[in-house]
Image (cartoon, rainbow, N blue to C red):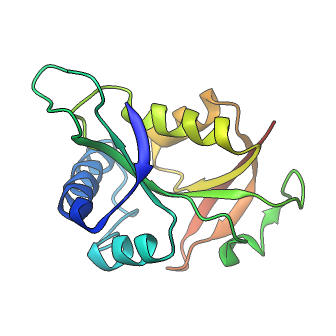
Amino acid sequence: MRIRKTNLDDISAVLETFDHARKIIRATGNTVQWSGEYPGKIDIEEDIQLDHSYVCVATEEYTGVELGTVLATFALPTTPDPTYTHIDGAWLNDDEYATVHRIAANGKVKGAGRYCMEWIIDEYSNVRIDTHELNKPMLKLIKHLGFEYCGEIMAKDQTPRLAFQRVG
């Protein structure tokens, strides 16, 4: 697997990845996060324009997966996130950080989402992420990778999210 910047030709594959992720989070009891059309085409286009959208693609043969196939996606802005300004709790530090948003895998290759998270923490020493309390698969991954719970923030849609940070 390999991480690269998302391009406009990837939009349909990223949308399919988001649809797959929605099904997984619904199946695991999360009926709140990623409702309606979010995230959608407009979010992907904005992430590409802002130069912080990435895809994980297949670089070796996997059963039934063509080389170059999109396996996962995420947004990774490195500017301060406005929703992180107010936290019911405390961040580990006030240093510059990268924020993981809209991370999703499409299930074509096991471990693609984890691969993305490991790439992110290899590339950035200070990473923040938030997720809904019902997003059990993401919570398990975040904790397994050494992220520390910092408190609660309010997402843009004014719903609470659990906030985590990893330094090191």
Picture residue at 84% right of the left edge, 56% below the top: 91
**Quarter containing the C terminus:** top right
Using the image, determine if residue 76 lies above or below residue 126: below
Q: Is residue 114 left or right of residue 91?
A: left
Picture residue at 31% right of the left edge, 25% below the top: 110
**Quarter containing the N terminus:** top left
Q: Is residue 21 left or right of residue 52?
A: left
Image location (x, y in percent) of residue 70? 26, 45
Using the image, determine if residue 63 lies above or below residue 11: above
**Count of marks overlaid on the render:** 0
Picture residue at 29% right of the left edge, 72% below the top: 40
Image quarter of residue 58 = top left
The residue nearer to you, when weighing 66 against 163, is 66
Picture residue at 20% right of the left edge, 21% below the top: 62
The residue positioned farthest toward the left in the image shown: 64
Image quarter of residue 108 = top left
Using the image, determine if residue 19 lies above or below residue 83: above
Image location (x, y in percent) of residue 154? 63, 73
Image location (x, y in percent) of residue 87? 78, 68
The residue nearer to you, when weighing 32 against 67, is 67
Image location (x, y in percent) of residue 2? 41, 35
